[in-house]
Image (cartoon, rainbow, N blue to C red):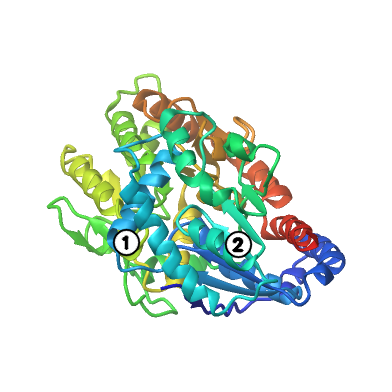
Amino acid sequence: MARIIEVDEPLGLWDYADLAFLAPAVQELRTEASALVPALRGRKLWMVNSTPQGGGVAEMLPMMVSMLRELGVETDWAVIETDRQPFFELTKRIHNMIHGVVSRELSSEDRELFESVGRENAEKLRAHVRPNDIMVIHDPQPVVVGSILKREIGLPTIWCCHIGLPERLPATRAVWQFLEPYVESYDNAIFSAPDYIPSFLAGAASVIHPAIDPLSQKNRDLHTHGLAGILCNSALAPEHSPVLTPAFDHPAMRLMPDGSWAPPSSWNDIGMQSRPIVAQISRWDRLKGFAPLLDAFAQLKRRPQPMASELHRRRLEIVRLVLAGPDPASVADDPEGLEVLEELRAKYLALEPNLQPDVVLLTLPMGSRKQNALMVNAIQRCASFVVQNSLQEGFGLTATEAMWKRTPVVGTQACGLRQQIRDGLDGRLVSDPMEPDAIARVLDEMLVDRGARERMGRNGQRRVYEKFLIFTQLRHWLRTLAETASR
């Protein structure tokens, strides 16, 4: 059942304050914390979610917990667990319904399973929680846990939902009706966009944007030799000459033309540092729009370019698409990942042989969180631009990460991406993520205009600094926690 996760982040706020470009943001956080943290003394803050790795929430929590502790807030992180696989199939269905997709309706048996697993985890946490602590529940999977502990011991609770849909469709109305009995008992609800707040929480919910840690392994600066070393260590590039660091325990794996998986460097060098690279890195989820992006890229490569300059024709000839995501077997709360990856595998194998080398499907191992993060960092920095072709997107931290690296981003009109990317200023927004023609047109425009890419990269980094770094997020959280404690 519920498991407490050890957090031992090597960096502290002073490490960030030592950097001139981060020092003002750290100082603003410290100043606000000095006024708010005293209201939280004598209470422990509990962060609860459904997985210790894979996805934006699991990536945000370690540094959030570490920084809150440093600011004087006693904080622990717990993950719910169960050996009942149908529970995660149910929560994936709930996730999809919140995004407007329904496979079948929610039943009384579903509610019984949802509540049963929630109660098992609540009972495990009850032994550790004091009635005046504060518990933050992330996303729908553990929502029953907070509801039970609120009702039975009076624990102050906050529900933080990182997903949503601006439209009110039959599927979203049905799933919110299913979740309402648990959510309505919470003291506060937090969403990543105002558009996601359901009607029964109108006036009783707040907005806090997700954020990134600028010095995490995924976002820290990589110098030339370090970048080359990571590519070689992970088999994303062949080792042409000696590198300082040893090979990673588990390399990235690439889909081969015969349908097998092998280290990428074993066949046809990707050209991460020499070719134009278009990259999308996400969990293997149909809502991430991998399939239409692959179709659009293949269409771009097949399209004749009679009016293009010689340089652009060469660019289109050698550009490659990199589609990457975590090894789906390692993400316990997302049973759909293997299905989605298999669908992409079939689509790749159906490509013409001459196109297959230019479409790179990668699974990134999760055995080492550090090594996985470094692989993502390297791919985002090597990309000419990053794509997030999401049909729906709660927020989209992969876009935030790329913007912080001054890598321009092509997103969609999905609500979470619209919170970040201003079309033509910080990146581009595709009009229809299911329409290969529209996607291919924007890919072509981005590839041809290097000046626009550089301008968007600069603007994107500035926007992340102002709105989407962890220091701003923590200031908002401290205000919410102090308000909850005062009640």
The quadrant of the picture occupied by the N terminus is bottom left
Q: Could you tell whether 222 is left or right of 246 in the image?
A: right
Q: Which mark is residue 327?
A: 1
Residue type of the residue flagged with mark 1: Asp
**Total of numbered circles in the picture?**
2
Which residue is located at x 44 percent, y 38 percent? 99
Q: Amino acid at mark 2?
A: Lys
Question: In which quadrant will I find the C terminus?
Answer: bottom right
Which residue is under mark 2?
150
Residue 396 visible in the displayed image: no
Q: Are marks 1 and 2 in contact (CB under 8 Å)?
A: no
Measured as percent of width and height from the top left, residue 449 is found at 53, 32
Vertically, is 16 above or below 447? Answer: below
Residue 166 drawn above or below residue 187:
above
Q: Residue at x 62, y 65 (%)?
A: 135
Question: Which quarter of the figure has residue 233?
Answer: bottom left
Q: Earlier in the sequence, mark 1 or mark 2?
A: 2
Q: Nearer the viewer, residue 358 or 110?
A: 110
| Observer able to see residue 11 | yes
As measured in the structure, the alpha-carbon distance from the residue carrying label 1 to the one carrying label 2 is 36 Å
**Residue 303 image offset from top left, x and y in percent:** 30, 25
Q: Secondary structure at mark 2?
A: helix
Q: Quadrant of residue 460?
A: top right
Q: Secondary structure at mark 1?
A: loop
Q: Residues within 10 Å of mark 2 (few under 14, many from 20)?
A: many
Left or right of residue 70: residue 377:
left
Q: Quadrant of residue 21?
A: bottom right
Determine the residue positioned at 49% across, 40% down.
Answer: 176
Disc 1 vs disc 2: which is toward the camera? 2
Observer-nearest of 227 and 183: 183
